[in-house]
Amino acid sequence: MVLTRPYFLRPTVMVARSLIGKYLVRHNGRGTLAGKIIEVEAYVGTSDKACHAAKGRTARTDVMFGPPGVAYVYLIYGMYHCLNVVTEREGFPAAVLIRAVEVDGEIIDGPGRLCRAFDIDRSLNRLDLTAKQCLWFEDRGVCVSRSQINRLPRIGVDYAGEWAHKPWRFRLRTDEKDVVCRED
DNA sequence: TATTTGATTCTT
DNA sequence: AGAATCAAATAT
C-alpha cells in the first residue's frame, strides 16, 4: 500500500523511525526498482542548525516549507544527489533524508549512491511522492520493532554545533536475526 | 563579484 | 588524507 499524505503529516522524528522497513519504489523507462529502507535521518525546522531550512526560506529550501509527502532533492559536493521527503504541516520546514536501502539482499549504503542506483536527480525535486507517479513509498507489511532500530547522531553535520549530536539517524540493525515482531 | 562550504564518495 | 566538482551561502 502506498504511503499517503497524512503519513508524512506527523512529527518528523516519528516519520523517520517509521520509514525503516518501508519500501522506496522507483518507476522509470527501465522498469521498476524497489528497496527496503534501512537508514534515514530527520531534519527538523529552522532552529535545527543542521537543517538546510535553518538559513530561512530560499529558492532551495522553499520546498521544505510546502506540504508533506513531497520530494526534496538537492545536489551535494557537486556530484551527488540526496533524496528527502518533506514532513509536517505546510509552513513548518522539515524532511527525512533517505540514507540507505536494501535491494534483493544487497545494501545500497549512502544517499549519493542510493540516488545513483535509483536514477534520482533534481528533475524529481518537488515531485508528489504520494501520487504514485515515478517515485513513491510503500508499506509491504514488514514489521520493525523499536529494538531493531539503532538511534545514532547524524552524519556530516559537525558544523551544526549542539544540533550535530542529536540522535536523529535511524538504522535497521542487521546483526540480530529472528527478532520477534511486536508493536510498541 | 569573489570566496567558501557542504545532509558525499572514491582514490591515494 | 585528499580529490572531484558545483550550487548556494557568505564575504567583499
Image: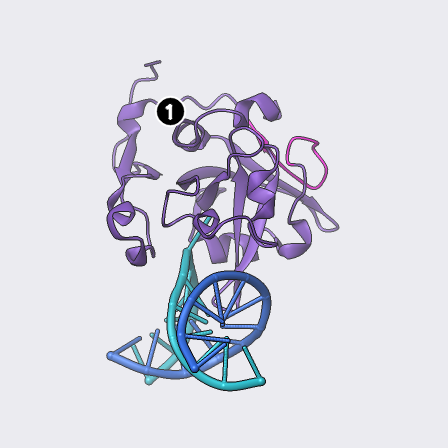
Chain colours: A purple, B cyan, C blue
Magenta stretch bounds: A129-138
The image quadrant that residue B8 belongs to is bottom left
Provide the residue designation for mark 1: A144
| Quadrant of the rendering where the C terminus of chain A is positioned | top left
Left or right side of A41 for A70:
right
Is A108 placed above or below A129 here? below
Residue A178 shows in this picture: no
The image quadrant that residue A145 belongs to is top left
* Magenta span main SS: loop
Q: Amino acid at mark 1?
A: Val
Subunit of label 1: A
Is A158 placed above or below A170 here? below
Q: Residue at x 43, y 32 (%)?
A: A12
Q: Residue at x 28, y 57 (%)?
A: A158
Residue A13 in the image: state x and y as whole percent.
39, 31
Q: Residue at x 46, y 24 (%)?
A: A142
Residue A76 in the image: state x and y as whole percent.
49, 62
